[in-house]
Image (tube, rainbow, N blue to C red):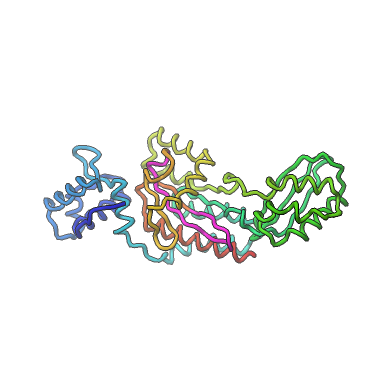
Amino acid sequence: MIYRDLSLRERQVLGIIIQSYVVTAAPVGSRTIARNYNLGLSDATIRNVMADLEADGFISQPHTSAGRVPTDKGYRYYVDLIMNVSRINDEEKKKIDENFGLIGTERKGTSADLLVSAAKVLGSISRQLSVVLSPRLSNAVFEKLDIVLLSSTRVMVVIAIQSHFVKTIVMEVQVDLSRQKIDAVVDILNERLSGLTLDEIRTSIARRLSDCTADKDLMNVIVGSADNLFDESSILERLYISGAEYIVDQPEFKQPQKVRDLISMIEDKFGMARLVDEVGCISDIPRIGSDVIISIGKENSERKAEDLTIVSSSYYVDNMVGKVGILGPKRMDYEHAVRVVNYMADCLSATLSDSN
């Protein structure tokens, strides 16, 4: 976004309006700024500065007699050119480490268990709606596979992928099955596919297994189902959400219709996952640091999110990339949001990578 260059006074007043509005959720007037902030400016001068900011679309006046509130453009200018994000403080770090560190050391479950817990920790600390997307698995490395016999015609295929990611699929099979035949097929699959990416397996499995002597019928079922077994996980399977109870307590959602719209958006899991996944694809939104992206109001791809801000970051597990973020009203503590999201992304990268 292109802005005119604000003067020092205008930057100071815009920053104060945003910081005050974040805390009080009430429009901010010139008298409040003059009395509570030592700017060395008169009430009249501050009114003139606010008038200029309003004329340029950085703030607006919700009611004739009210003070001013930030607009999307004002928030955008603030996070791009005014906000100063410091390193995570000891108290914030301790809250995350006490919860997430415990999760990381236990590691008795799968990566899905870790991501569920990470979403809960982030929601609790940010007091917003937290969203975690597990990495795309097309570049994930296959470790091993097992086949569980459920009935004479049904099996469950369990695929273990690097970093404790697990993919399970139940299949109907019209072939004669026995544990001995299944074990023989599993041994061949694990021997020939281990160390390949899911994408490599999907595109070459028929060739790699063409000379197998194990049970042909079951092997043909596996090869014929490769596009389903070794495909990219559905975006719905990758989504973990927590913290709805915190966001509905915000003043912005006191109106019943606002709450209904928010709940409807949360229940649309596909839309939620796509909303967070697409934030990094908006090329003209600058990053905060190396990976944190803030998408404000109408910058979001979904109409239902036009009153929200998304603060997200990527995390990395070898050659895989996931997303972690929070959604909340535009009136949020942006510095705090950036710090905790960035730190949680670092924690996820470290913990999931250490599990290899």
Name the spot of residue 59 as percent of width and height, x first: 25, 46
Q: Which residues are magenta?
A: 304-324
**Residue drawn at (80%, 43%) of the image:** 150
Whether residue 323 appears in magenta in the rendering, the answer is yes
Of 11 and 123, which appears nearest the observer? 11
Q: Quadrant of residue 250?
A: top left
- Left or right: residue 108 versus residue 54 is right
Picture residue at 75% right of the left edge, 51% below the top? 206
Above or below, 30 against 104 in this view is above
In percent of the image, x 58 and y 61: which residue is there?
Answer: 319
State the residue in front, 275 or 191.
191
Q: Quadrant of the C terminus?
A: bottom right
x, y percent for residue 21: 29, 49
- Position of 180 relative to 191 (above/below): above
**Visible residue check, residue 23:** no
On the image, the x and y values in percent for residue 333 come to 36, 54
Magenta-drawn stretch, dominant element (helix, strand or loop): strand
x then y, percent, for residue 82: 29, 59
Task: Examine the rendered structure and indicate whether residue 115 appears above or below residue 156.
Answer: below
Residue at 30% in and 55% down? 78
Residue found at the far top of this picture: 257
Q: Is residue 120 visible?
A: yes
In magenta stretch: residue 57: no
